[in-house]
Image (cartoon, rainbow, N blue to C red):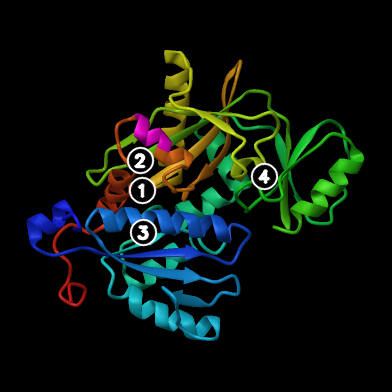
């Protein structure tokens, strides 16, 4: 039997949530996994769930049903589904999803959105812009420079090469000589025409998850440490070889520095919902790596693990994200049908 969400008990009606997964980038399959997990958690929590998928070619489908043979036609069909929603849960990672694209669509349709808005999503996806914001609020980042695809970059020391707007470490590589640097730049250019070349930072990899509740309160879950035998690259992220410690083994000063910087970064970007803020913990304190405004959200992902350590179950976390997004008061009559 489906459980009743607290809103349903209070108002006698069920929230209708549209979960969107897939997407037109390299993180398509990761986004599908997040969408599946979120939809199951919402069903379990008593929500009425509609599932939309964006295929790799940009066409949309509802469940198993195609909404059109062309992206524009299928988007029109998807908008009809979105129009009946009390909120949209955009379970997409990477460009044309996490970067504010879906947030803009929801803003135009006046549909409440789970998570960050257009501005926060766009800046958070842009690693260069994120560095500038971090430095403006006193959070250290790795020294680096922005180059364009095809630019000649002279090798001087070990560097990390990253596409400016990509996720799941796609196109990210460590370059230890001139040949590796040329190859890393070539691979990164497959994902973005703007590329970040950063000095290597030596330190422990620590993630912090930050949540803004429906009452506006913002707090950080216990930090998580990533343990790997090498770089935490795309393969390591999804082959099961990485180990996580949560809570991370930190002293009070380290924990306060990390969580304080994470919340400060969350606020500086104007994030909503949940975000994962990734750091290197060095001898001189935290160094920001990146911000994920729509992090991986399967039950096994880092963010749910961190909140589980704080006593918040996966189903509770997903429900809280929806509660924070939905405009107070009962749904409008056209959405309650």
Disc 3 secondary structure class: helix
- Judged by depth in the image, the label closer to the viewer, 1 or 4, is 4
Residue that mark 4 sits on: 235
Question: Does the magenta stretch mainly form a helix, a strand or a loop?
Answer: helix
Identified at 63% across, 46% down, the residue is: 128
Which segment did they paint magenta?
305-309
Q: Which mark is residue 211?
A: 2
Q: What residue is drawn where x is 73% and y is 30%?
A: 200
Q: Could you tell me how far apart the alpha carbons at marks 4 and 3 are, in whole angstroms?
A: 26 Å
Label whose residue precedes the other's in the sequence (4 or 3): 3
Position of the C terminus by quadrant: bottom left
Question: Looking at this rendering, what residue extends furthest in the front direction?
Answer: 1
What is the C-alpha distance between the residues marked 1 and 4?
28 Å
Please indicate, yes or no, whether residue 153 appears anywhere in the rendered image: no
Mark 1 and mark 2 in contact? Answer it, CB < 8 Å. yes
Could you tell me which residue is drawn at 55 percent across and 85 percent down? 70
Q: Is residue 59 left or right of residue 192?
A: left
**Residues tagged 3 and 2 counted as in contact (Cβ below 8 A):** no
Q: Looking at the image, is 307 positioned above or below residue 202?
A: below
Residue 14 shown in magenta: no
Residue 247 position (above or below residue 64): above
Which sits earlier in the primary sequence, circle 1 or circle 2? 2
């Amino acid at each position: 039997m489906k459980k009743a969400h607290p809103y349903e008990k209070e108002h006698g009606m069920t929230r209708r949530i549209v979960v969107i997964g897939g997407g037109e980038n390299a993180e398509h399959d990761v986004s599908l996994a997040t969408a599946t997990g979120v939809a199951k958690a919402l069903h379990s929590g008593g929500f009425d769930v509609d599932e939309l998928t964006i295929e790799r070619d940009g066409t949309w489908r509802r469940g198993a049903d195609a909404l059109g043979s062309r992206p524009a036609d299928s988007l029109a069909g998807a908008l009809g589904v979105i129009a009946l929603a009390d909120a949209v849960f955009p379970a997409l990672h990477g460009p044309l999803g996490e970067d504010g694209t879906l947030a803009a669509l929801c803003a135009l349709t006046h549909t409440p959105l789970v998570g960050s808005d257009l501005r926060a999503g766009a800046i958070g996806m842009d690693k260069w812009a994120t560095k500038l914001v971090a430095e403006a609020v006193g959070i250290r980042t790795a020294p680096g420079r922005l180059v364009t695809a095809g630019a000649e970059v002279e090798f001087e020391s070990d560097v990390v090469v990253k596409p400016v707007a990509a996720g799941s470490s796609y196109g990210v590589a460590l370059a230890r000589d001139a040949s590796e640097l040329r190859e890393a730049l070539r691979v990164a250019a497959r994902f973005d025409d703007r590329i970040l070349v950063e000095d290597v930072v030596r330190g422990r990899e620590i993630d912090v998850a930050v949540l803004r509740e429906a009452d506006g309160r913002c707090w950080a879950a216990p930090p998580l440490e990533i343990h790997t035998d090498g770089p935490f690259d795309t393969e390591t992220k999804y082959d099961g070889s990485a180990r996580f410690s949560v809570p991370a083994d930190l002293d009070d000063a380290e924990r306060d520095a990390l969580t304080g910087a994470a919340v400060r970064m969350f606020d500086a970007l104007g994030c909503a919902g949940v975000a994962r803020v990734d750091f290197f913990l060095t001898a001189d304190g935290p160094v920001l790596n990146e911000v994920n405004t729509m992090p991986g959200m399967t039950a096994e992902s880092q963010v749910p693990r961190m909140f589980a350590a704080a006593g918040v179950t996966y189903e509770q976390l997903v429900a809280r994200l929806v509660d924070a997004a939905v405009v107070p008061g009962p749904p409008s009559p056209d959405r309650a049908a």
